[in-house]
Amino acid sequence: MQTLTEKLLARASSRGRVKPGEIVVVEPDVVLSHDNTAAISAIFQQLPHERLRYPERLAITLDHAVPPPTARHARNHARIREFVREQGIGNFFEAGRGICHQVLCEEGIVGPGMTLLGADSHSTHYGWLGAFSAGIGRSEVAALWATGQLWLRVPESIRITLAGKLSTGVTVKDLTIGMIGRLSSDGANYMAVEFEGDGIANLSPDSRAVLTNMMAEMGAKNACMAPDAATWRWLAETLSRTRPHDHKERLDVFRALALYPDSAADYAASHHIELDEIEPMVSCPDAVENALPLSAVARTPVDLGFIGTCTNGRLEDIAAAADIARGRRLRKRLLVIPASSLVLRDAAEAGYIADLIDAGATIGTPGCGPCMGVHLGVLAPGEVCISSANRNFRGRMGEPEAEIYLSNPAVVAASCVAGYLVHPADVTGGRPAAS
Amino acid sequence: MARTRHRVWKYGDSVNTDVIFPGKYTYTVDHDPAALARHALEDLDPGFAGSVEIGDVIVAGRNWGNGSSREQAVTCLLAAGVHAVIAKSFARIYYRNAINSGLLVIECPEIVDQVDSGDMIELDMEAAEIRCGGRRYPFPQLPEQVREIVEAGGIIAYVKKRS
Ligand code: SF4
């Protein structure tokens, strides 16, 4: 009897089965890096290996500082393009295509049953597709490039059962902030988090990714759930757009690889969450685990809002913001950065971008934007930002003297309308949308 | 290397990688050890970089190094001369990065509340224990396969050795 994580790691290490605590050597299907690729290639050069062991397994995106804000960042990108050419790497995604985690899902680089190791802490993301995925460091990535292999400790798994349905105005972001508040930032340290239960069927694909992405903030090694009908539908629709020539074959590969947990698998801990009991939540400065109900901090003044990132920069996030902004005037600055060019295109086609611009919002190039304090909207000392990102550590978005609150995108947009933290219903409720 | 003596820098719980090495430098400060060392713990303890000495150790609470996967949060401490980080627990990626870069990381929750900045401790790697104030604090040894990597001086040295 094995958990989904154990089955995925057994496959990745070519073993019949694996047990928590065991050290196994895995050969991942995909190795991810982004703007840090040049730094990793400098480490790779210290090795005697001139060529990559499996160039076809690398996936590289330019996303952390795009378009490059300084000549230094531009040189970094140029070095990465050079490396991609030299080594013949096919899965390379240019600046503007979007954030690594969103792009690799959209492009069908990772899918059910596969394993990804990434030089990025939110590499837990891909578990929403039924994959094993974990973040690792740069030297490890360089070693992986050279040998195709890396050691991993098989994690104990925590099972989280989701039951029922979220109430209107409540999102998976609120669920994850509440969970991290309760279980703390190391509540799942070194562990796998597996989601199951009838509540998952009620969660959109866009929001499932929030769940696995945010588990990085609980210290998890990986987070995952078994693929279901909605997963397959999303893959079929998305891949037919991004890979018109081979989407059917790619889906067949995923179907053959998909794995499911045994119902009697052993979990180190189990939690049960009734989705309709969740209320809007906010992470207060300077830690994600400083979680409070929105109602407890309502009317806290904010200077600006940010909607974007690999956590909450997808179409449904931008739709939620547009629904609030439509026909209203933002009192505070709102920066919206779609997670990918596909998201931007769909948001433009649906009219969301126009709604946001009319309300006074700024739209940025798909990528990480100011999430990690590099550029495109970093904060000044003393500024208070309400953000849909995943992290609010001191100095994360630029100045250490700035304050970052985290919430779902509707709360961000509503707070920019009101000028202070507010429940979206208090902005939209009862009033005609065009007032 | 039987027993070694170290001066302690003491920090609290949940120290994250953004305050160990600020994200704003991650793509501009990379390989220059002096520059890495200069920004170590910049947003946590502005006094650290100026007065840390080779061989000092950091003793911290739970979940040291949570947050980003940036390796500079490990290499900046190596560059600053830090010999080891001893903590109640480590964030997962930080722990891996430390092992794979050759920074000694020791999980020993019992000692953390017993020492303060400026105290001296003794480290005995063979016996896998820390000595301080007349008491001994044992800590768990790493698994065999992982110890080989640390002993080689990190994963790059390890891969080099085996290729
Ligand atoms: S959006 Fe933020 S959290 Fe996500 S990959 Fe980019 S920098 Fe990291």
Image: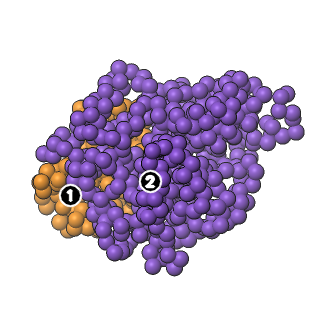
Residue A151: x %, y % from top left:
28, 60
Chain A shown in which color? purple
Tag 2: amino acid: Arg
Q: CA distance from mark 2 to mark 1?
A: 37 Å
For numbered disc 1, what is the local secondary structure? helix
Q: Is mark 1 within 8 Å of ligand 1?
A: no
Residue at image position (35%, 73%) is A18
Label 1 marks which chain's residue? B
**Residue farthest along the top direction in this orientation:** A71
Q: Which residue is mark 1?
A: B149
Residue closest to the eye, A135 or B114:
A135
Mark 2 chain? A
Of residues B113 and B106, which is closer to you in this image? B106
Residue A19, given in percent of the width and then of the height, sits at 37, 74
Label 2 CA crowd tier, 10 Å (few <14, some 14–19, many 20+): some
Which label sits in the foreground, 2 or 1? 2
Same chain? Circles 2 and 1 = no
Q: Which residue is mark 2?
A: A250
Disc number at residue A129? none
Q: Residue at 23% of width from left, 35% of height from top? A: A86
> Between residues A273 and B75, which one lies in front from this camera angle?
A273
Whether residue B133 is visible, yes or no, is no
Q: Quadrant of the C terminus of chain A?
A: top right
Horizontal side, residue A169 vs residue A362: left or right: right
Q: Secondary structure at mark 2?
A: helix
The residue depicted at 25 percent of the width and 54 percent of the height is A148
Residue A24 in view of the camera:
yes
Instruction: State the count of labels.
Output: 2
Say which chain is orange.
B
Residue A221, position in %: x, y?
42, 58
At x 40%, y 65%, the residue is: A8
The quadrant of the rendering that contains the N terminus of chain A is bottom left
